[in-house]
Image (tube, grey):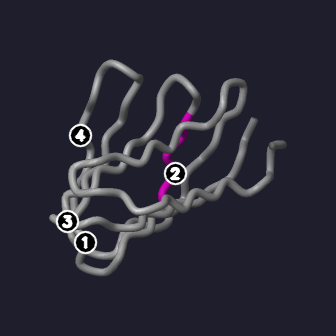
Amino acid sequence: MAAGDAYVVLSATVTNGSFVDLQPSAGTEVVVHNIYMPEGAAYELYWYDGTNTLKIDHDAAVGRTNMQFHCTNGKWIRIKNTSGASQNIGADGMFTK
């Protein structure tokens, strides 16, 4: 993908306790703008480098909008489903490199 192209992720069903990784392919970078969760579904956000995990947010609303999470292949955002049930999870943003 080229800089300026849309970055769009829509997971298949994610079981409770599992993650969706917003990790672009090697050599690309993205800015994540929105994370989509079903209304009332609990989730946690983590900053991750493949080894180290930093919990940065949690909620049980409808997701996050108007964010500026910069993700590379080596450092990215993970979304953990903590709702107690399987959920579909989505995200979008823009390729910057």
Question: How far is the residue under mark 1 from the one under mark 4?
Answer: 17 Å
> Could you tell me the amino acid type at mark 1?
Ala
Q: Are marks 3 and 2 in contact (CB under 8 Å)?
A: no
Q: Nearer the viewer, mark 4 or mark 3?
A: 3
Q: Earlier in the sequence, mark 1 or mark 3?
A: 1
Q: Residue at x 58, y 60 (%)?
A: 92
Residue 40 rendering spot, x and y as whole percentages: 23, 78
Query: What separation in Å lies between label 1 and label 3 (alpha carbons)?
Result: 5 Å
Q: Which amino acid, mark 2? A: Gln
Bin the neighbour count of mark 1 within 10 Å (Cα to Cα): few under 14, some 14-19, many 20 and up: many
Furthest toward the right, the residue is 2
Residue 68 lies in the magenta-colored region = yes
Earlier along the polypeptide chain: callout 3 or callout 2?
2
Q: Position of residue 19 (x, y in %)?
A: 34, 46
Q: Are marks 1 and 3 in contact (CB under 8 Å)?
A: yes
For discs 1 and 4, the disc positioned in front in the rendered view: 1
Question: Which of the two discs, 2 and 1, sits closer to the camera?
Answer: 1
Q: Which residues are magenta?
A: 67-71
Distance (Cα) linking label 2 and label 4? 16 Å
- Mark 4 — residue? 55
Q: Which residue is mark 2?
A: 68
Image position of 90 (left or right of 8): left
In the image, what residue type sits under mark 4? Answer: Lys
Compared across the picture, whether 45 is left or right of 92 comes to left
The residue tagged 1 is 41
Q: Is residue 82 above or below residue 78?
A: below
Please state which of residues 7 and 10 is positioned toward the viewer in this rendering.
10
Residue on which disc 3 sits: 83
Q: Earlier in the sequence, mark 1 or mark 4?
A: 1
